Amino acid sequence: MGKDVIVACDFQSKKLTLDFLELFTGRKPFVKIGMELFYAEGPDIVRELKARGHKIFLDLKLHDIPNTVKKAMAVLSKLDVDITNLHAAGTSAMMKAAIEGLTREDGTRPLLIAVTQLTSTDQESMERDLLIKEPIGDVVIHYAKTAKNAGLDGVVCSPLEAGIVKKACGMDFLTVTPGVRFADGDTGDQKRVMTPAEAKRIGSDYIVVGRPITAASDPVAAYERCVKEFVD
Ligand code: C5P
């Protein structure tokens, strides 16, 4: 897996998604299917995009008791996705159960990564709502190490934290980073943000970019700009 830009297809329907992806003539961006699209269209949207040649990050952020997550992951293992994820806050027992569920009979499985703290969470909301008082960077590192020890392949984290995660968990431990914005763009509800170029410099393996591409007046140009800043 090399460095790549993953386009967050946060659309309400298959039609809107396919209309959007058809703008990319000749290119097959790595796409992220999140809750909105998956809940609207079900597993068929994964099969459809896979059949069209896209790599897929299935971003459903599982978080439940270990047995439930194991069984849900066993169902997801039948979809040919490249990356899927869960919340590290579910604890290492849940993460180990997830790997068991996700591993197919032939021993293969999609990459499994853990959400540390959502990039919409900041120090203040974490302290106030979650009663977690440690510095957010320490919390992210602790969750990343717990995920690594449970056998996961990497984490979703803010690009601001990708460097410290690599330092704590090793260069092979994947960092997938949403919360990416162009220097001249809106931040929206994302609180811990970075540009594609900065994310590259700090060592992110994948950036996940939604609205800066999907809501751009020229989405293909915005995608190309991300690729130019992050990959080339
Ligand atoms: O539109 P925007 O670029 O903010 O989209 C970011 C995408 O990454 C969304 O689909 C969001 O659900 C996802 N994400 C995130 N923060 C995380 C994990 C996933 O923003 N920690």
Image (tube, rainbow, N blue to C red):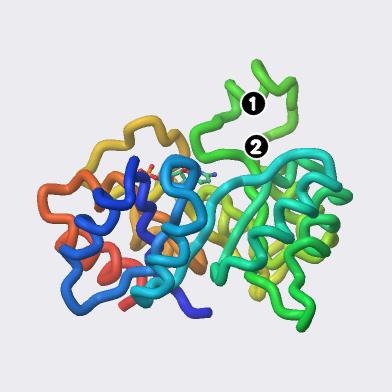
Residue at position x 60%, y 59% in the image: 84
Residue at position x 65%, y 16% in the image: 128
Q: Residues within 10 Å of mark 2 (few under 14, many from 20)?
A: some
Frontmost residue, 46 versus 130? 46
Q: Is residue 45 left or right of residue 118?
A: left
Frontmost residue, 105 versus 223? 105
Residue at position x 72%, y 43% in the image: 138
- Residue 109 is situated, as x and y percent measured from the top left of the image, at 69, 73
Q: In which quarter of the image is residue 21?
A: bottom left
Does 73 sit above or below residue 232? above
Mark 2 is on which residue type?
Answer: Ile
How far apart marks 1 and 2 lie (CA) works out to: 8 Å
Q: Residues within 10 Å of mark 1 (few under 14, many from 20)?
A: some
N-terminal-most mark, 1 or 2: 1
Dot 1 falls on a residue whose secondary structure is: helix
Q: Name the residue under label 2.
A: 136
Q: Name the residue under label 1.
A: 126
Disc 2 beta carbon < 8 A from ligand 1? no
Q: Residue furthest left?
A: 217
Q: Quadrant of residue 137?
A: top right
- Residue 40 is situated, as x and y percent measured from the top left of the image, at 43, 42
Verify CB contact (< 8 Å) between mark 1 and mark 2.
yes
Position of the C terminus, as image quadrant, is bottom left
Does 85 sit above or below residue 112? above
